[in-house]
């Protein structure tokens, strides 16, 4: 995440309660997904996307494994979507890298 993206995310979280709720929800869901076993995320037919009620709000979490590197590192993008209004209709997301040994990392910078 670039410094501009971090600034914008921080600003939106402070400005909008709706965005802050979605940011908290997608961070929690992203961390939960990052704890899943590596192999479980690659099973054929495994549905990673889902919806959940959080604080009385229906939130869709679109989950996509968007890249697998030659070393087996899996890059996962989690996008929160909701009917909640947010500034400029921007919704937060969470990205992590899952290694074949089970460790997970979020990109820095």
Image (spheres, rainbow, N blue to C red):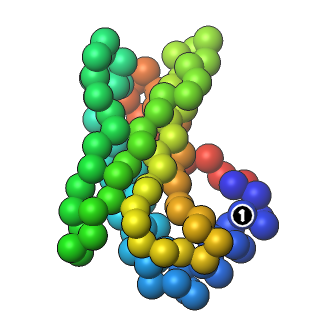
**Image quadrant for the N terminus?**
bottom right
Residue 13 in view here: yes
The picture places residue 27, in percent across and down from the top left corner, at 42, 59
Q: Nearer the viewer, residue 97 or 93?
A: 93
Q: Residue at x 71, y 73 (%)?
A: 7
The picture places residue 57, in percent across and down from the top left corner, at 27, 70
Depicted 94 relative to depicted 15: above or below: above
Depicted 57 relative to depicted 107: above or below: below
Q: Residue at x 57, y 87 (%)?
A: 15
Q: Which quadrant of the view contains residue 40?
A: top left
Depicted 86 relative to depicted 93: above or below: below
- Label 1: element kind: helix
Q: How many discs mark residues in the rendered view?
A: 1
Residue underneath mark 1: 5
Q: Is residue 54 left or right of residue 34?
A: left
Q: Nearer the viewer, residue 103 or 13?
A: 13
Q: Is residue 64 left or right of residue 34?
A: right
Q: Residue at x 60, y 77 (%)?
A: 87
Q: Is residue 81 left or right of residue 2?
A: left
As drawn, which residue projects farthest toward the bottom? 15
Say few, some or many: other residues with alpha carbon within 10 Å of mark 1 (under 14 / 14 to 19 / 20 or more).
few
Q: Which quadrant of the view contains residue 53?
A: bottom left
The picture places residue 17, in percent across and down from the top left corner, at 45, 84
Depicted 42 relative to depicted 76: above or below: above
Residue 31 in view here: no
**Image quadrant for the C terminus?**
bottom right
Q: Is residue 45 left or right of residue 10?
A: left
Q: Residue at x 46, y 46 (%)?
A: 78
């Amino acid at each position: 995440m670039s410094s501009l993206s971090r600034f914008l995310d921080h600003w939106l979280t402070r400005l909008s309660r709706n965005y802050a709720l979605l940011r908290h929800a997608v961070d929690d869901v992203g961390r939960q997904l990052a704890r899943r076993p590596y192999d479980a995320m690659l099973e054929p037919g495994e549905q990673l996307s889902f919806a959940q009620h959080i604080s009385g709000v229906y939130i869709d979490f679109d989950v996509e494994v968007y890249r697998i590197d030659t070393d087996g590192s899996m890059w996962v993008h989690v996008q929160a979507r909701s009917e909640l209004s947010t500034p400029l209709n921007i919704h937060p997301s969470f990205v992590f890298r899952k290694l074949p040994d089970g460790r997970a990392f979020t990109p820095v910078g």
